[in-house]
Image: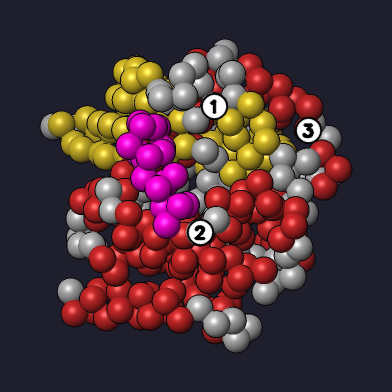
Amino acid sequence: MDILIIGLGVIGTTYGSVFKEAGHNVEHYIREGSNKKDVTNIEVTLLDGRKSSKGIQVKSEYTVNSYSKKEYDMIFISISQGKIANVMEILQKEAFKGTILLCCNLWYDKQYLDGIMQGYDYVLGFPVAGGCIRTKRDELVAKAELDCCLFDHFMIESENKTTISNYKAVCNLFKSCNIKLEKPYNMLEWIWIHMAVNAAVISVIGKNGDINDSTASVHKLMNSLKLLTTAIKTIRETTKIAASRGINMKYYRNELWVYKLPAQLSAIFMKRMFATNNLTRRIMELHGNIDDLQYICNSVYNEGKTNNVPAPVFYQYLEDIRRKMIEG
């Protein structure tokens, strides 16, 4: 496939590297003024979960190819803070054509999202990967390092919920990379639930840890039965906020069953998982985009308040974190 990736972020570059490794043509559009505009090579350290559930660490070099045409089989967009409208303006201005794979945190409803997408054919997905990318200048050369992890599956909208013409080709792209596809009942609702769960976990980490040292704060959560129990109870609050958007939660039992168990029992399961699964632990450690974490939490908080959903622990924790950030 001919693939255009918008930007040079963690998710786009992680998947771009495995697409390219599988023999696909991968090019990037990087906006003028970006601190990554001059980056041509990236040193990639990947904890690869495709062949082992615990992950195999591999190092490689990824060559960044700039866009060379205007029409692609697929345009891959993963943008933080739900800033899709900004990206769509660029696509329109540059007259890029192709099926869009949109895979990021979104708190928009379908009608609003369709409006933002400005008539482009798109399919919703969600990455099961994470990491951090660092850029540095060595004399006149811009260099970058990507530390990332990748699971063996990717979430994607089912074919009957989308109108794209090359759905099977997109599925075959992931198959060629040894990545399985999971198709929830409704992809957009699944993203809302995922954001709600994350908002709860972030609020517990932020309340009980150092907001300036996210790795240490995450470790504190993963190693504490008490904090994990609190996280479970907070997840129960935030998933009720997601449900207040009109989601029929029975379709998401597989995702939510662990939070229905007695909280301390769920916490024991989670603590054991973090202790034994290197991949799961690593994705927690590497998720440090503060702006995106705030977007997730604020989206859920505002929805809960608007819909008068009782979530006392979540609201209190988030308000305490906001005060901490202001006091600095």
**Count of numbered badges drawn on the protein:** 3
Q: Nearer the viewer, residue 157 or 3?
A: 157
- Position of 261 with respect to 228 (left or right) is right
Q: Which mark is residue 167?
A: 3
Name the front one of labels 1 and 2.
Answer: 2
In the picture, which quadrant includes the N terminus?
top right
User: Badge 3 local density, few (<14 within 10 Å), some, or many (20+)?
Assistant: some
User: Badge 1 local density, few (<14 within 10 Å), some, or many (20+)?
Assistant: some
Magenta stretch: includes residue 31:
no
Secondary structure, mark 2, is loop
The type of residue carrying mark 1 is: Asp
Residue 72 figure quarter: top right
- Position of 185 with respect to 296 (left or right) is right
Q: Residue at x 34, y 20 (%)?
A: 57
Looking at the image, is mark 1 or mark 3 earlier in the sequence? 1
Residue at the extreme left: 139
Residue at the extreme top: 23
Q: Nearer the viewer, residue 1 or 96?
A: 1
Q: Position of residue 82 (x, y in %)?
A: 54, 60
Looking at the image, is mark 1 or mark 2 earlier in the sequence? 1
Residue 309 figure quarter: bottom right
Task: Report the magenta residues as a range.
Answer: 264-281
User: Badge 2 local density, few (<14 within 10 Å), some, or many (20+)?
Assistant: few
Q: Position of residue 59 (x, y in %)?
A: 32, 18
Residue 8: in sight, yes or no? no
Q: Nearer the viewer, residue 114 or 195?
A: 195
Structural distance between the alpha carbons of marks 1 and 2: 30 Å
